[in-house]
Amino acid sequence: MTILSRCIVIMSGVLLFSSQFPIFSTTTTATQKTHRFACHVIPRQSLNQTTPPDQQSPNPKTILSTITNLLWGQSLPPGLLISTVRTTWNSTWQLMMSQLAPSDSSGRYTRPASKFRLNPPFTLQNSTTLHLYVGLPCPWAHRTLIVRALKGLEDAVPVSIAGPGQDGSWEFKDIPISNRDRNILVPGRDNANGCRNLKGVYGLRRSGGYSGRATVPMLWDVEKKEVGCNESYDIIEFFNSGLNGLARNPGLDLSPKELKGKIGEWNGLIYPNVNNGVYRCGFAQSQDAYDSAVNGLFTTLEAVEDHLTTSRYLCGDTLTLADVCLFTTLIRFDIVYNVLFKCTKKKLIEYPNLHGYMRDIYQMPKVAETCNFSAIMDGYYKVLFPLNPGSICPVMPSGCEHDVLLSTPHNRESLSLANKTTKQDH
């Protein structure tokens, strides 16, 4: 039998199987897309019921394995088939990546701009109609959770936590309270609108709905039924100074006037090279794009590592919004970005100052509760299909476990004491 004939036999078997058991079909009609979130009801059998052997659906892996064994036994498929599958997969991968991570003509990832920016009318000192939507895997949403916690805004700004669906959208899940860790944030229901997914919340806008990307974080005005903002930095600036009348910790200022210049400089370096830099590595669609991104990433990490030798935080002894933004990338580095996003030159644990700095912030009151490592890993490895087709979630590195290293003493407070002593001596 020729190679071409063998390929035809395999494809015929797959098509025959798909036609007999359409539940495995990968084709999605426009109607199915429209109602993707409208119904997920699948008939269930009683636990006491059994399906007769002649009515059971055959395992697709078993059928394909049988066909291939008949054609070429234990040897590898012929080169023509391998090259055909590889070409098809590469084309499919590029198509998926164009939707997941848009790139320019050179294959460099270009992050889409946030659609809803914070406008001056949305800065009421005592607003009580705000609701925050987040997803735990997302570092941009994580920023808002940390500032909300540090400022004591949990009661003033309730939160709904979505989880990533298999198609990459954000969905709300009904998790029984008995299965929740009360000390760690977990996905749950939409507590403001009762929607099944975040796209549904965006669609409730009184001013005309919304059909674009439904991203987190998102600040929602319950009374106006309007998206107030979905730009993370706008939201954390607003939480820092715009709701002090409702905050339990109004005296904390993460962006003091005298440090705004330094904060801006650090953000200007860290955002493109680290925060977005890890995504530019993982979502690169050409070797040149990857090389450029990974060089920028590790050059910046080296520079920050050197700076933290003598400075407790980025701007001295004061924790700022710049530190919060860097932290949410660092806490994900070894468990996700180093492996899945090919940021492999070094692990974060190999940078003693950066790792100590990360532990310093992690050990601040309320910060650890915002770090759900299981949700973070699931949100990347099990959902980013183009980067991890098998959806296999690796074991968590030992250096990222709460009780092993993240909670060990960091001794970085000594840098602050040393700086103060030096200033007093002068």
Image (cartoon, rainbow, N blue to C red):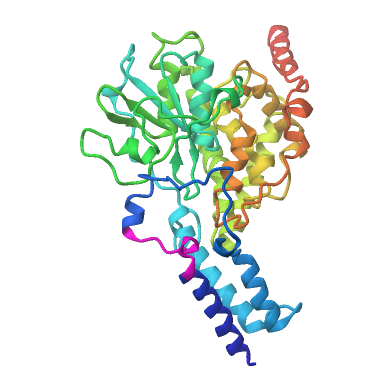
The image shows residue 279, relative to residue 83, as above or below, that is above
Instruction: Please state the horizontal and vertical placement of residue 376, each as a whole percent of the image.
Output: 60, 38
Q: Nearer the viewer, residue 116 or 377?
A: 377
Q: What's the magenta region?
A: 20-30
Q: Residue furthest left?
A: 207
Name above or below for residue 282 compared with residue 199. below
In the image, what residue occupies the spot 38% across and 23% down?
131
25 part of magenta stretch: yes
Q: Name the residue rendered at 58%, 42% in the picture.
A: 47
Which percent across, then down, holds residue 327?
A: 60, 31
Quadrant where the C terminus sits is: top right
Q: Nearer the viewer, residue 27 or 304?
A: 27
Query: Based on the displayed image, in which of its 4 quarters is residue 192 positioned?
Result: top left
Query: Between 224 and 237, which is closer to the camera in this rendering?
Result: 224
Residue 28 position, x and y percent, is: 39, 60
The structure residue drawn at horizontal position 70% and vertical position 78%, both measured from the top left corner, is 69
Specify whether residue 45 is in view. Answer: yes
Snapshot quadrant of residue 300: top right
Judged left or right of residue 225, residue 239 is: right
Tell me if I can see residue 106 in this picture. Answer: no
- The N terminus appears in which quarter of the rendering? bottom right
Is 391 situated left or right of 207 in this image? right
In the rendered image of this protein, does residue 13 appear above or below residue 109?
A: below
Outermost residue toward the bottom in this view: 1
At 65% from the left and 67% from the top, the residue drawn is 62
Number of marks in the rendered image: 0
Tell me residue 360's x, y (percent). 68, 22
> Is 206 within the magenta?
no
